[in-house]
Image: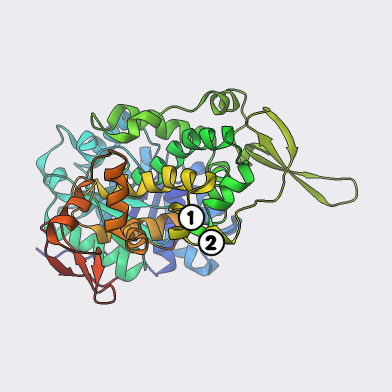
Amino acid sequence: MSREIKSVAVLGGGTMGAGIAGACASDGVPVLLLDVSSDAAAASLDRIKTGKPPAIDDPTKADLISIGSFDNDLARIAECDWICEAIIEDLATKRALFEKLEPLRRPGSVISTNTSGIPLRDVTAGMPESLRRDIAVTHFFNPVKVMRLMELIPGEDTTPDVMAAFADFCGRRLGKGVVYAKDTVNFIGNRIGCFWMLSGLHKAKAALDAGLSMETIDALMGKPVGLPPTGLYGLIDLIGLDVMDLVGKNLEVNLPDGDAGRAYTRFPTVEAAMLARGQLGRKTGGGFYRMTKLDDGSRRKEVFDLQAEDWRDAGDSDIGDAHDTAEALLFADDMAGRFAWDLMGGALAYAADLVPEISDDIVNIDRAMRWGFAWRQGPFQLLDALGPPRFAERLENEGKPLPAMLEVLRDAGAQSFYRTDGSEFLGRDGAWHRVPAE
């Protein structure tokens, strides 16, 4: 059966729901936006039109969005081809809503849950087969209007035509970069990206003790390795320590036994104290950094020194020309190089050990990190820049096990994960495959 999405119901008018509704309406698709009350839905529609920035560029497109409440208008989902649940990240609340909507939706409609970390199998456990066949995870990244990545995750019973309908609509109509992930904790982007951040807080502590400044750590974890200029501490300030704490707790419960990420699910002592007193990041006026407006109108940038546990003026970073590329930095025999190898090298090794657990191939992992976390190169592209045999040799010299995909590369006698100008990639089977079109 071929399914086509021509109308959408978005259940939940929060940040993500409003973003998804705005994206669909912007493309000329009729949207039914439901929330806990009609007033809440009306407020969400107002944010879609007047937010800073608005979720929709052309205000006239907002006329395609009709609103209502769960109590009074849930039966209207029968009018829609796609029912997208985007309510609070709470398993019991999601399950209760799905139990209500399943008898109301039209046969042949497709359903999705927009979650960043709750396994689909937990959402659908014990649900009717009709729902389990027609449901998938559509994990949009925030803000929906700006972020290209959309992770698409099937359940055990999801039919191929459902996946095809979501891929076609979200990719072709909405212009998203669709990445195929597995039903595992935090999927692809957040699994690797949050490992990098949480492990970074711990590994940076040793670097601070060795004499690197926080400003230098952020500079090293920016341009030289192809990451955004926020670096480590700046990115966590943007996300918020409270959000990262929830991520860590979710990982602690759901990561497989023996996973390297289990060592980093809780904050170091100083960061835990910051969380406890509400020093969360930009949303609270300061986390690791803060900006203070002075009497003369200028702004003063300060850093919360994690060793002194007090604010000081932010200084310049000192990374030097010898550390201007990932290869030069990670293989440098100095304090900066050892830190970069520990953190960035650790994250690359972690990613290389997650095929096929979180994805069937390296292409989806690379795209997720580029489109969702703004890495200039995905983990396997970055490994190619470093030289996978050299990377593997260093791991072995340090007595560390080879990650799964580095074993595949070694056994295949390959020197890289991509070849022929990036048009072919090395598969888990040790054979070369064509890179799918973006």
Is disc 1 in contact with disc 2, using a CB cutoff of under 8 Å? yes
Q: Which residue in the structure is indicated by mark 2? A: 324
Tell me the quadrant of the picture where the N terminus can be found: bottom left
Identity of the residue drawn at 67% across and 34% down: 305
Q: Which residue in the structure is indicated by mark 1? A: 329
| Numbered mark located on residue 299 in the image | none
In-front residue for pair 103/358: 358
Image spot of residue 111 (x, y percent)? 24, 50
45 to 121, vertically: above or below: below
11 to 164, vertically: above or below: above
At label 1, which amino acid type do we have?
Leu
Q: Which colour scheme appears in the figure?
A: rainbow
Callout 1 crowding tier (Cα within 10 Å): few <14, some 14–19, many ≥20: many
Q: Give the mark, 1 or 2, whose residue is nearer the N terminus.
A: 2
Callout 2 crowding tier (Cα within 10 Å): few <14, some 14–19, many ≥20: some
Identity of the residue drawn at 24% across and 30% down: 258
Image spot of residue 274 (x, y percent)? 60, 27
Secondary-structure class at tag 2:
loop
Image spot of residue 390 (x, y percent)? 31, 56
| Farthest right residue in view | 296
Secondary-structure class at tag 1:
helix
| Farthest bottom residue in view | 420
> How far apart are the two marked residues, 1 and 2, measured between alpha carbons?
7 Å
Image spot of residue 359 (x, y percent)? 22, 51
One can see residue 73 in this view:
no
Q: Is residue 129 left or right of residue 116?
A: left
In-front residue for pair 409/7: 409
Indicate the quadrant where residue 374 lies.
Answer: bottom left
